[in-house]
Every structure is written in C-alpha cells, then in structure tokens.
Image (cartoon, rainbow, N blue to C red):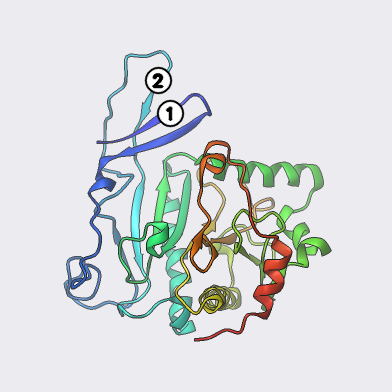
C-alpha cells in the first residue's frame, strides 16, 4: 500500500508506505550498491537511481477514498532517489577528494533542476543519514532525495517564516542573522563563500548550519566558487565531528531549498542552507527524540550552543 492520509488535527499529510518496511539491511559480505552488484551491472563514479523501497511513487494512479466527511487520502505521486557519492565502498565524506564532493553538489543541482520541472512536485528534500543510529541501512556513502506532491509541514513553516520576515523588513532573515553579532559569535569556521555556525537555537547538542554568505535562494543559484566552498564546508564539518571522539560520528544532513511550483516566488525571502543533526550528546549517549520532542516539537537541548561552538573551534581535525 502507498497513499497519503491527511491528518485534520494538525493539518498535515502522512505518508503510508508498506514498501519501506521491506527495506533490507546490508548483508555483511555483499554491498548492493558497489560496482557490479544488485543496483549496478558495471562501474560508476557518482550515480543516482530510483529507490527500490520508496515512500513515494509516480506509478500510483489511484487511491482508496474513505467513506468519511473528515478523512481523505491523496496520491503519493512523488519520487524517491538514492544518490551515490562514490563507487568506492570504503570512502566516506571526510576522506573524499574535494573534487568528488564538488561533483556531488553538481549532481544535487542537476536532480533539483530536473525534478522541479514536474509541476505536481511542490517540495524537493535532499538529505543524508549517516550511521545506524539514524537509520542508515547500508554503509556505502550515499544520500537520498524525496520529492513531495505537497509541502511537508515543517518546510512550510520555514518558508512562511522567511516570507513573513521579508514582507515585514524587506530583507532576508538569514542574511540579517549572519550580520547579527550574537548569532555570529557561534561561528566555528568560514570560507570566502560560506559560514558554519552552531545556531543560537540549536535543537541538538552538536547541530551545525552551513550558510552561503551571499543571498542564494536555492542550491542551483550557487556559483562555481560557492560550490567549491560548500564541498569544503561539508567535508570539514564531518571531519570535525569524527575528530570529537575519534570515531565515525552519526548525523543527519538536510538541504533546505524553497518550495517549487506553488505560484509564489521565494527569490528574495528564502536563503538556501544545510543543517546537520547529529544524535550524539556524549561519546556513548544519544539525544533521543522522546515524548516532548515528538509530541510537541519543543526540543530540549542538553548542551549550551555557545559552549559547543567554542569546543568545536578548538577541535583538532584528524583525518
């Protein structure tokens, strides 16, 4: 079964997909995404392919509608892709060549451009789950892309906040945050084109945001030098994480682009950025999304962001 179900209690869509429950974990002696494997009959450098166990699918043409005045279903007419960072099984973000990560940024742009041309798609969400702690089922370096036929609730709130701020101030919220001394105090490193910040309002202890210094609405608006800086900033952030406890640090990396095909323009209000959410709060302790976080969206951060920013500035990167 694959369908959308609308929750009238909070005004959001829920994806019901039994296909995702069939997703296997990686066999210890066989990687399904290495060259000459289940997914690839030859070699590759970077690659993308449709997820075999998608939450959303463009192939569903009809869904059951309940006999109810309050309940309704929708077509899960989106697309779920797997994005392979490299063909090398032992290679991961912190030890990749910068040129490889630059090619990854280019692939994000290519996929965003193509999928945004489908008028029924309203939101494109690119992300990476690293580590079993955040649900990664294979260890080979990869990310994913979900394209939604609706705007997920939190993405809608973010886009609306950006728009509301712009209409009230005639300036970009993120651009103004980057100029704010109190916010900028938590900068952990920067390049010519990007800033890496532990946000003042972090929800996770080691949360880091990457912001282009220039006003850029979406990833496709980055110029060549900014793409290089973004590749460096992603790699350096993960190297910092892995150097904290001298072990592979799990994280969720999420790319934030504006909604698409809505009839609204976000060029002036939206500011592309990346957010890292590592679940660790100590070497052997995780920050769980428990009842308060899950039930209310009110996060309890057990660490002071200013202290974490100061700590990360002092971390000696080990490769």
Q: Which residue is mark 2?
A: 71
Q: In the drawing, does residue 293 fall left or right of residue 110?
A: right
Q: Which picture quadrant has residue 308?
A: bottom right
Q: Which residue is mark 1?
A: 6
Q: SS of the residue at dot 1? A: strand
Closest to the observer, 210 or 278: 278
Q: Count the marks: how many?
A: 2
Q: Is residue 143 left or right of residue 87?
A: right
Tell me the CA gap for discs 2 and 1: 7 Å
Give the residue displayed 48% in from the left and 47% down from the top.
123
User: Dot 1: within a 10 Å radius of its alpha carbon, few (fewer than 14), some, or many (20 or more) residues?
Assistant: some
Q: Which residue is outermost to the front?
A: 284
Q: Is residue 160 visible?
A: yes
Residue 149, percent from left and from top: 42, 40
111 relative to 189, above or below: above
Disc with the residue nearer the chain's start (2 vs 1): 1
What element does badge 2 sit on? Answer: loop
Give the quadrant of the N terminus. Answer: top left
Label 1 near label 2: C-beta < 8 Å? yes
Q: Residue at 57%, 84% (x, y): give it.
A: 317
The answer to whether one can see residue 180 in this image is no
Q: Looking at the rendering, which quadrant does residue 175 occupy?
A: bottom right
67 and 244: which one is in front? 244
Image vertical order of residue 161 relative to residue 86, above or below: above
In which quarter of the view is residue 96 placed?
A: bottom left
């Amino acid at each position: 079964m694959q369908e959308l179900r609308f929750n009238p209690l909070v005004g959001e869509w829920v994806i019901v997909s039994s296909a995702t429950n069939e997703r296997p974990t990686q066999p210890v002696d066989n990687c399904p995404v290495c060259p000459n494997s289940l997914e690839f009959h030859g070699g590759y450098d970077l690659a993308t392919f449709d997820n075999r166990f998608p939450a959303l699918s463009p192939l569903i043409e009809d869904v059951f509608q309940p006999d109810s005045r309050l309940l309704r279903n929708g077509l899960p007419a989106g697309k779920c892709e797997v994005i392979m960072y490299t063909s090398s099984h032992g290679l991961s973000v912190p030890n990749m060549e910068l040129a490889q990560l630059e090619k990854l940024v280019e692939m994000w742009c290519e996929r965003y451009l193509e999928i945004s041309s489908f008028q029924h798609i309203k939101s494109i969400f690119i992300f990476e789950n690293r580590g079993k702690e955040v649900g990664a089922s294979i260890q080979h370096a990869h990310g994913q892309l979900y394209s939604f036929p609706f705007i997920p609730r939190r993405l809608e709130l973010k886009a609306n906040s950006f728009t509301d701020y712009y209409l009230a101030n005639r300036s970009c919220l993120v651009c103004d945050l980057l100029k704010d001394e109190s916010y900028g105090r938590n900068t952990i490193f920067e390049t010519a084109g990007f800033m890496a910040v532990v946000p003042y309002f972090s929800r996770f202890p080691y949360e880091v945001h990457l912001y282009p210094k220039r006003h850029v609405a979406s990833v496709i608006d980055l110029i060549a030098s900014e793409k290089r800086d973004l590749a460096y900033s992603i790699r350096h952030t993960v190297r910092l994480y892995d150097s904290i406890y001298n072990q592979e640090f799990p994280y969720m990396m999420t790319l934030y682009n504006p909604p698409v095909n809505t009839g609204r323009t976000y060029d002036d209000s939206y500011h592309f950025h990346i957010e890292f959410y590592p679940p660790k709060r100590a070497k052997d302790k995780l920050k769980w999304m428990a009842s308060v976080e899950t039930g209310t969206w009110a996060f309890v951060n057990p660490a002071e962001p200013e202290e974490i920013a100061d700590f990360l500035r002092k971390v000696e990167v080990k490769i």
